[in-house]
Image (cartoon, grey):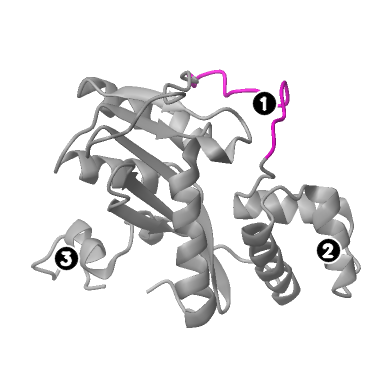
Amino acid sequence: MIDPHHAQLSVRRQCRLLGLNRSNLYYPAAGESEENLQLMRLLDEQYTKTPFYGVLKMTEFLRQQGYEVNPKRVRRLLRTMGLEAIYPKPGTSQPHPDHRVYPYLLRDVVVNRCDQVWSTDITYIRLASGFVYLVAIMDWHSRYVLNWALSTTLEADFCIEAVTEALAHGSCEIFNTDQGSQFTTARFTQPLIDKGIQVSMDGRGRALDNIFVERLWRSVKYEKVYLQDFQSVK
């Protein structure tokens, strides 16, 4: 990065050219011990294979790999990674009191044209000595990734910036997300509503509600992340 006081390019433009989110400039990189990073790599690979594994099954999986871990530690690492087992869990979710949860609008809807439905999701991306989070916005009909952003934290800023940039170049009829706090905040949903877009949110733990983005993450990890072994955020 060039010092903004001496650069002809704005910080926003520099980050865009580097494929980074501006939040990386303001938040410290996520830090974990080497052992925890190794556990997170194993959890990430296993979750990609078996997203229905909960804390207890993940704990047993790590123990089979020779690691003496307890469920409390595994639960914390999964939460740090933003991972949650995919299966119906009625009554276990308490929405943020200031955040509105919208109903799921895509049940039995036939998606037959571009810009009818967009969706978004976040995934954990491992690095050689740390990790970052990737958010992508996808058109359901074409499977085209409209925009994406990286962040070293799970703060909502990089998601808001990604959707703002996507909306600057187009629009859709329905925008689908999960119930993560990054997407339920009015800072994320209000720009959609202002453009006349209907907001749809998955039921808790229902991966099939956002299956196309889930397939994208599987492809990204098996075809790029696990093979590339990225060394840094840049």
Secondary structure of the residue carrying tag 2 is helix
Pick the front one: 146 or 124? 146
Label 1: few (<14), some (14–19) or many (≥20) C-alpha neighbours in 10 Å: few
Check disc 2 and report the residue beneath it. 61
Q: Is residue 74 left or right of residue 222?
A: right
Of the residues under marks 3 and 2, which one precedes in the sequence?
3
Please say whether residue 215 is one of the residues in the magenta stretch: no
Pick the front one: 75 or 196? 196
The kind of residue tagged 3 is: His
Secondary structure of the residue carrying tag 3 is loop
Within the image, what quadrant is residue 121 found in?
A: top left
Kindly identify the residue that appears in the image at 42 percent across and 26 percent down: 106
> On the rendered image, what quadrant is the C terminus found in?
bottom left
Within the image, what quadrant is residue 10 found in?
A: bottom left
Q: CA distance from mark 3 to mark 2?
A: 51 Å
Kindly identify the residue that appears in the image at 74 percent across and 51 percent down: 76
Q: Nearer the viewer, mark 3 or mark 1?
A: 1
Q: Nearer the viewer, mark 3 or mark 2?
A: 2
Check disc 3 and report the residue beneath it. 5
Q: Is residue 39 above or below residue 137?
A: below
The kind of residue tagged 1 is: Ser
Kindly identify the residue that appears in the image at 69 percent across and 37 percent down: 87
